Amino acid sequence: MSAARKHVVVFRKIPDDLLGRIAERHDVTVADPRRADELPRFRDALHGACGLIGSSYKLGASELREANSLRVISSISVGVDNYELPFLKQRGITLCHTAGVLTETTADTVFALVMATSRRLVELSNHVREGRWTRNIGEDLFGWDVHGKTLGVLGFGRIGQAVARRAALGFDMPVIFHDPFDVTLPAALAGRAQRASFDEVLARADIVALTLPLCDETRGLMDAGAFSAMKPGAIFVNGSRGAIVREDALLAALDSDHLRAAGLDVFAVEPLAHDSPLRNHPKVTALPHIGSATHETRRAMAELATDNLLRVLDGATPVAAFDLSTI
Ligand code: DGY
């Protein structure tokens, strides 16, 4: 265990007690690079930094090139698409993330979008709120059953499996899934979830939930061809990353009535542009990237990221490191 103080840059707000834990052991610069007034201090601090902890900022090779002492980036996220993985690998920088602690919360969000889109919850809540509930609703406002529908899950990692459990065990939904990697089916899903090709999932699912990570292979994967391969009247839900979806193609599929609805927690550009057609689209339920955003889970993520950072700086194995040997 190395006791020498090192320099840590905290680039996203973390709870004071966790900041205190880091500051007890290391010299800390707190600077949020998304704020123009803090960006120069952030860049300056990178020069001597051994560790970085934060999230929601694209940290590319050009910015890290001068960070010659950098040993660890501890991301307060499970997704690692904000980092240039080949660069980190080549430099021997450990990349930690918060896999595990946000699985169930993010699956809750994805399933909430399944419910909201199928049963038109936001639209009908607005119907009441805006004083339009003046007589019993008619067929034009009826929804679509969720129970018994076939759920297609694209990406069957931790979150995809947790969504599948909710669907299969709670809503009696047959589940089909596609994942590019080998998957060991958890006992709870034995006999309830079936592996299928990407095309088969699109063709057979009533509701497609996207839980794949963003990488070169998945960027733009949901394009015009993929949407037109979905069942007519199906629903599309995205709880992973917006850039996996060609938003123009999704809009076309909604506007042509090929798709019934879309539930989106993530967008190609976030926050969603004021003039994005997805913002007010009648068939879209849009959320502001809240997958893991509960008090309990955000706290757990910040704690895990702090543990990861301190462990690597101590020369110990982090609790959750992204495996850079796979790239
Ligand atoms: C994650 O943990 O990757 C969330 O989507 C936040 O970015």
Image: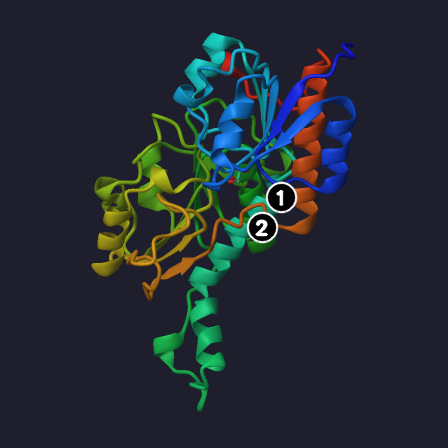
Tag 2 secondary structure = helix
Q: Residue at x 62, y 43 (%)?
A: 104
Given residues 265 and 164, the one toward you in this image is: 265
Does residue 319 appear in this view? no
* Cβ of mark 2 under 8 A from ligand 1: no
- Numbered-mark total: 2
> Residue 4, percent across and down?
75, 12
| Position of 318 relative to 101 (above/below) | above
- What's the residue type where badge 2 is placed? Asp
Q: In this view, does 260 lie to the left or right of 290?
A: left
Q: Which residue is drawn at 42% across and 15% down?
A: 86
- What's the residue type where badge 1 is placed? Glu
Q: Which residue is drawn at 68% across and 50% down?
A: 295
| Residue 108: image tag | 2
> Does the residue at mark 2 contact the one at mark 1 (Cβ under 8 Å)?
yes
> Residue 316, percent across and down?
72, 13
Q: How is the image coloured?
A: rainbow
| Position of 227 relative to 126 (above/below) | above
Quarter of the picture containing the C terminus is top left
Find residue 323 and report its image quarter: top right
* Cβ of mark 1 under 8 A from ligand 1: no
Q: Which residue is drawn at 46% across and 68% down?
A: 122
Does residue 43 appear in this view? yes
Q: How far apart are marks 2 and 1 (CA)?
A: 6 Å
| Residue 104: image tag | 1
